[in-house]
Amino acid sequence: MTRKIGILILLTIFLAAFFFHKANVPVTITRHVEEPEKARSLTSSLGASKLSVPRSDRDAAVISKTAVVGAHEETLGSAFEDLKNQAIRGNSSASCRLALELQRCANGKRALEAASLMTQSSNGTDYMAEQMLKTNEALAYFCDGVTSKMLNEAYRFQKMAAQNGERAHLKWLIARPEIDQQNFLNNLDAWADYRQSADAYVRSALIEQHGDDLELLLNIYAPVGAVVSRPPYRIEDNVTFLALLDVAQRRGLSFSPSMLTVAQGIKQSLTLEQQLALAKKSEQLNKGFSAPQRDAYLKIILPLDEEEFCK
C-alpha cells in the first residue's frame, strides 16, 4: 500500500509537469548578494558560450514559418534532423519549437513510465494509470524515435532561441532550463552556462525594470519557505526580495498567503540597518518598474500556444 501511494504521488507530479509543459528542477543554484557589476543588455547577456552555435543573421535564414510547423505533422523523431538543421542555420522558430517539443516528450516519457509502474503494482486495475496510458497514445506516437541523445540537446536549442533577442525566450530559459537534473554530473557545462545567463539576466532586469520581469525576479529572490514556481537559480537577498514584493503589490500583482507570511516574518526580523536599506531600495525600484502585463510569468512557463510563443 505504501509503495502504491508513493507511486501515485510520483505519477501526479509527472502528470502536472506534462500537462503544463514544464519540469520541476530540484537542482538549485544559489548565490548570496554580491557586489554590483556593470550590467549588460538582456540580449548581449547571453553572448557567446560553450553551448552557443554560430548562426547567420535571421534575415539570411530564408525558411518559412509554415515549413517549421508543417514538419510537426510527422513524428518528432523523423522531423528532428530537419528542425535541427533549420535551428543551426538561424531559424529561431525552429530552435524554440524543437526545445519545447523535446521538453514535452521528456515530461510525457516520465509520466508514462510512472503510469506503467502504477498499473504493474496494482495488477493493471488502477483506473487513473490506465486512463493516463490511453490518453497519451498520441503523444507516444508523436515522440516515436526520440532518443536520449536528442532529449539531451533540448537546452542547446532553448539557448539558441533565447539568443534571438526575444525577451520571452530568455525568461523561459531562466525560469525553466531544459537540463536533465537526474544526470547533473553529465551536464556541468550546461549548468555553468545557465548560471552565467541567469546572473546576467538578473543584473540587467533590475536596471531595465520591465514590469513583466517582476514575478520572475521575485521567484528568484524568494526565500526558503515561500511557495512559488521557483527556478533552479535563486539569490539570497531578503532586502531586495522585500523591495520587489512591495513594487509588485503596488502594481497589482497578488501572491499566495505563504509568500506574504514569509515576507512578514522576514520584515519583522530586519535590523535597523536593513530597514533603512529596504526603504532606499523600495524607493529606487518603485520609480522605475512599469506595470506588468496580465499573466506575463505564466505565459513563459506555460506556453500553451506554441506557435505564437515560437513565432
Image (cartoon, helix red, strand yellow):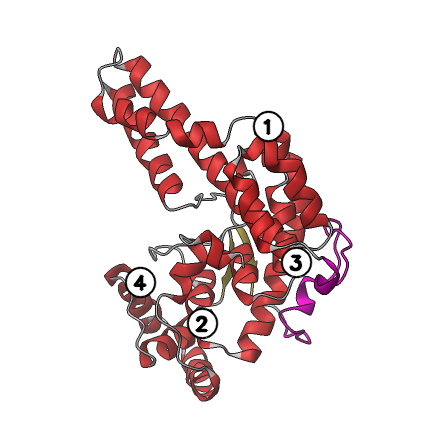
Q: Which residue is under mark 2?
A: 212
Instruction: Pick whichever, 47 or 304, lies toward us.
Output: 304
Tell me the residue at 60%/31% (across/down).
Answer: 78
Q: Which residue is under mark 1?
A: 147
Tell me the residue at 63%/75% (across/down).
Answer: 36
Q: Which residue is under mark 4?
A: 259
User: Disc 2 or disc 4, which is closer to the eye?
Assistant: 2
Per the model, the C-alpha gap separating discs 1 and 4 is: 40 Å
Q: Is residue 107 above or below residue 274?
A: above
User: Disc 2 or disc 1, which is closer to the eye?
Assistant: 1
Q: Residue 12: which quarter of the image?
A: top left
Per the model, the C-alpha gap separating discs 2 and 1 is: 36 Å
Dominant secondary structure (helix, strand or loop) of the stretch shown in magenta: loop
Q: Residue 32: which quarter of the image?
A: bottom right
User: Disc 2 or disc 3, which is closer to the eye?
Assistant: 2
Q: Amino acid at mark 1?
A: Thr
Instruction: Pick whichever, 243 or 66, lies toward us.
Output: 66
**Residue 59 pos. (x, y %):** 71, 64
Tell me the residue at 54%/44% (across/down).
Answer: 70
Q: Which residue is under mark 3?
A: 196
